[in-house]
Image: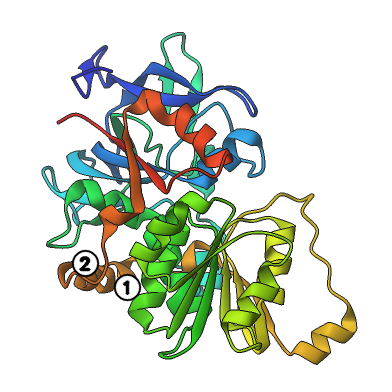
């Protein structure tokens, strides 16, 4: 891997290393790309770290559809290198968190205060972000193209890193932590003393477990296909661990006096897991789905059970979070030692390690893999 974050080329561009998805279903390529200088309303950021999220894998395999070829990566933090005309909320030298889903502030969801559902949040993904050496145009996978030594983003895609949060750890705030925190505090609205089950102990699942602990849940059941993740789950706050099987819902009801949990949070995005999370929830409980599944993942319920169980099933986008509102809250928990960002990370890798991180993700191994860039 290059030890230099960028190399100047022709006027107005520089060369940086980036992870490029050439086409849906194709292997990632680590190549040099030509990145322009920031224009009006743009910010150039030198990445300190970027998390490898399941959404990146979903883009690469076509579960989520956005323009390609693209530089992937949407969970990152770094240092501002330069700003374009009109940018005033950050300056060169500032540490920033990348916000892959910025709100426009004027569409219908934004007018309702539901900024996480902004109709225009991903319009930037269609822009030309950079070019390969042969001139091929590249898009920013989820607006911010964080799998690169440097990136240029819209000013609304950067937020100052809160005081007291290490820059490398701050990368996780850009997706995993906001999603897990929001699933517990905004979507499911877990109350002190309630019981919670979390399905999937990856990066988002580990953040969800910590959020449930901070919310004061009386019992927290972690569920995953891998027995090896039990230690990770318990360190994050799980009070019980269940290896996923055909009897998972029955085991969870047994752990909760036969009733089921008050809240189940599904972080996998598979029909069978969503159905199991629903079956694990008590009568009148809440099931929140965070995982992104494909169109082929059909979940079925009969009309009688919907009436009888009286449960609430809800989707959850980006943790139903407003980063500008939630980052200061998360920072207070980090500074107080209640939220441990480093505990989400099980592997530190270079750019070249991203394909291997995808393989581990598919195999259900580990928590968050974090790409760490050289100083």
Residue 44 seen in the current view:
no
Of residues 190 and 110, the one nearer the viewer is: 190
Q: Is residue 63 above or below residue 89?
A: above
Q: Decide: is 268 above or below 25.
A: below
Residue 334, numbered circle: 2
Q: Residues within 10 Å of mark 2 (few under 14, many from 20)?
A: some
SS at circle 1:
helix
In percent of width and height, residue 81 lies at: 17, 37
Residue contact between numbered discs 1 and 2, judged by CB atoms under 8 Å: no
Q: Quadrant of the C terminus?
A: top left
Where in the figure is residue 130, as x and y percent of width and height?
41, 25
From the viewer's perspective, is 121 left or right of 58? Answer: left
Q: Nearer the viewer, residue 147 or 343?
A: 343
Is residue 180 in view? yes
| Residue in the image at 35% along x and 27% along y | 351
Q: Position of residue 46 (x, y in %)?
A: 22, 35
Is 153 positioned to the left or the right of 105 in the image? left
Residue 72, compared with residue 19, is above or below; it is: below
Residue sitting at x 70%, y 85%: 311
Residue 191's image quarter?
bottom left
Residue 3 as seen in the image, left or right of residue 135 = left
Q: Residue at x 61, y 23 (%)?
A: 26
> On the image, numbered disc 1 is attached to which residue?
325
* Nearest-to-viewer mark from 1 and 2: 2
Report the number of numbered marks.
2
Q: How is the image coloured?
A: rainbow
Distance from label 1 to label 2 (Cα)? 15 Å
The picture places residue 175, in percent across and down from the top left corner, at 41, 55
Q: Residue at left 36%, top 54%? A: 174
Q: Earlier in the sequence, mark 1 or mark 2?
A: 1
């Amino acid at each position: 891997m290059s030890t230099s974050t960028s190399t100047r080329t022709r006027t107005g561009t520089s060369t940086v290393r980036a992870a490029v998805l050439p086409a849906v279903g194709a292997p990632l390529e680590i190549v040099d790309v030509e990145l322009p200088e920031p224009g009006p309303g743009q910010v150039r950021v030198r990445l300190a770290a970027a998390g490898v999220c399941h959404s990146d894998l979903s883009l690469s395999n076509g579960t989520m559809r956005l323009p390609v070829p693209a530089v992937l990566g949407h969970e990152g933090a770094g240092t501002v290198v330069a700003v374009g005309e009109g940018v005033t909320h950050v300056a060169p030298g500032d540490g920033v968190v990348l916000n892959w889903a910025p709100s426009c502030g004027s569409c219908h969801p934004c007018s309702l205060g539901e900024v996480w559902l902004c109709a225009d949040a991903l319009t930037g993904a269609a822009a030309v972000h950079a070019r390969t050496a042969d001139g091929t145009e590249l898009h920013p996978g989820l607006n911010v193209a964080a799998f690169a030594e440097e990136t240029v983003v819209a000013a609304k895609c950067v937020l100052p890193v809160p005081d007291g949060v290490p820059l490398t750890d701050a990368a996780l705030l850009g997706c995993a932590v906001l999603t897990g925190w929001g699933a517990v505090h905004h979507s499911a609205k877990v109350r002190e003393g309630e019981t919670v089950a979390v399905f999937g102990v990856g990066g988002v699942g580990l953040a969800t477990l910590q959020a449930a602990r901070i919310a004061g849940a009386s019992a927290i059941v972690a569920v995953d296909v891998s027995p090896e993740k039990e230690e990770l789950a318990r360190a994050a706050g799980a009070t019980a661990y269940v290896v996923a099987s055909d009897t998972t819902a029955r085991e969870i009801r047994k752990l909760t006096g036969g009733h089921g949990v008050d809240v189940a949070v599904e972080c996998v995005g598979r029909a069978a897991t969503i159905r199991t999370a629903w079956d694990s929830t008590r009568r009148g409980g809440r099931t929140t789905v965070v995982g992104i599944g494909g169109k082929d993942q059909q979940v079925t319920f009969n009309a009688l059970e919907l009436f009888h169980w009286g449960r609430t099933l809800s989707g959850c986008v980006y943790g139903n979070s407003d980063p500008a509102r939630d980052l200061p809250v998360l920072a207070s928990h980090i500074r107080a030692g209640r939220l441990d960002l480093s505990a989400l990370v099980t592997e530190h890798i270079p750019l070249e390690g991203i394909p291997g991180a995808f393989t581990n993700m598919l195999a259900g191994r580990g928590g968050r893999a974090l790409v760490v860039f050289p100083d």
